Amino acid sequence: MVKKALKILFILCWWFLLAGCDRAASADLYARVQEVRLDNGLKVLLWPENRAPVVTLQVWYRVGSRNEELGKTGISHLTEHLMFRGTEKYGPKVFSRQVQKFGGTDNAFTSRDYTAYYEIGPQTSLKMWLEMEADRMRNLKVSEELFRTEQQVVLEERRLRTEDDPVSFLIEDTVAAAYKAHPYQWPVIGWMHDIKSLRREDFLAYYGQYYQPNNATLVLVGDFEPEAALQEIRATFGKLPRGPEPPPFRPLEPPQQGKRQVSVHREAQLPFICLAYHVPNLGHPDAYALEVLSSILSQGRSSRLFQQLVYEKRLALDIGADYNLATACPSLFMVYAQPLPGKTVEELEQALEAELTRIKTTPVTDRELIKAKNQAESGFVMAQDSLFYRGMLLGRYQTIDSWQRLKELLPGIQAVQKKDVLRVAQQYLVPQNCTVGILHPVQTDRPIVGRYQGYGQIE
């Protein structure tokens, strides 16, 4: 008995020691980040981490689908594709082959607020990556033939991801109806007819306007010596001239004044429902409480919606909520669900509304609040083990606001109280702020491909 008690005491002491180390490490997590701005306006963020001879280089451009205009939606994503079509120095597809030749990987992604390019691999490849990324920032060469080829690739991508996926199609329609004025209303990949009508001249003008050093952030994380790396960055990116400043972003979304509804009748096996509420983003005092609310509702199988509607009432096949505070403009808080075969979408909608009413009228429990905070903290700290994810956080936060905001994330989450969760639920999850989208199945033998993915980001 005594031995068992000593064993438990030892485990507890060890756990608290580790917890203390982790908290100390997380508190000082960003102390090694160095921030430099070159004369041409390029922002450089360096985060040395020498535990393995690996680095990730990321170049973030402050341009995404929100910078587009109607009639030319999807041009940000198409530009991302064309960035792999080569320069005079490095021809088509040479970029990725050069990265892979020495054991590295590369790719890119576009969102509503940014477009980013990255490489991960041996630190001995860093100089080559810097040369190639700096080269394609200003020297891209795309013929009419290559432009048309890549345009067809993107059209096929849209057919696969959205046109042939009824759930994605519903989500797209619901988001479009939720906005009246803000460009968040159109999908990152763009509307089909806009992608078809884009011309090479549109791409060249867009590339020239936004792909400038003064509209970009270079992030370097991993095994490097900061002074030597900065010298290489100045020798490559530092040679590029400063470009014209991108046009200022001015669109604002007017407050929603009543419930909006969207119905989609598509080939599908089961119905689907999603609710979209306008909510604030990073920098607003309610953002952290909304993050906790999202976690309590849907993170994991022990979350409130999953327990009530999947396990106990056996109404839903799948259910979830999605909120991303790291956006440049106020975004949407999404709640979505798919009924079990034999259950109707009306039954599920009533049950969803009952659960949202419950969280607006009864404070969450201490256990729910602590669990949500622990999930946020453990997820954030454990993810720092990835060099790539560290770079992602630095690049994303710097592009939408400032990387310094990362220091406020965990303290902001930990400061959320039960009354804050109750207040934001009462304030934002209301009918006059809601757009409801419902998928009504039209029976077909065609398979359903893929499902809705959060964060509005595509590769």
Image: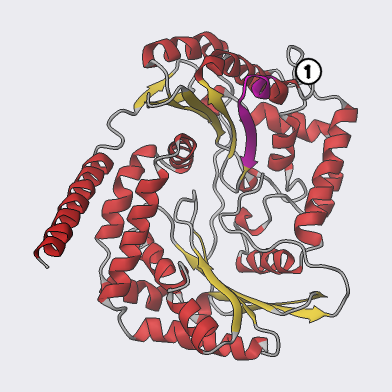
Judged left or right of residue 239, residue 73 is right
Percent of width and height locating residue 29: 29, 37
> Which region shows up in magenta?
98-109
- Left or right placement of residue 112 versus residue 187 in this view: left
Picture coordinates of residue 73, whole percent (x, y) = 73, 48
Residue drawn at x 47%, y 43% as measured from the top left: 400
Nearer the observer, 51 or 406: 51
**Residue placed most toward the observer, 258 or 83:** 83
Image quadrant holding the C terminus, namely top right
Residue that label 1 marks: 91
**Looking at the image, which is closer to me, 400 or 445?**
445
Q: How is the image coloured?
A: secondary structure
Q: Which percent across, then down, holds residue 172?
A: 69, 63
Amino acid type assigned to the residue bearing label 1 in the image: Gly
**Placement of the N terminus among the 4 image quadrants:** bottom left
- Above/below status of 417 relative to 9: below
Quick check: 199 above or below 332?
A: above
Q: Is residue 208 above or below residue 349?
A: above
Circle 1 SS class: loop
Foreground of the two, 370 or 407: 370
Asked if the magenta segment contains residue 101, the reply would be yes
From the top left corner, tell me how far across and down residue 458 is, in percent: 65, 48
Q: Residue at x 68, y 63 (%)?
A: 451
Is residue 278 shown to the viewer in this render? yes
Residue at the (74%, 39%) spot, across then down: 78
> Is 113 above or below relative to 125?
below
Q: Is residue 317 magenta?
A: no
Residue 276 visible within the image: no
Lateral position of residue 422 relative to residue 116, left or right? left
The image quarter containing residue 96 is: top right
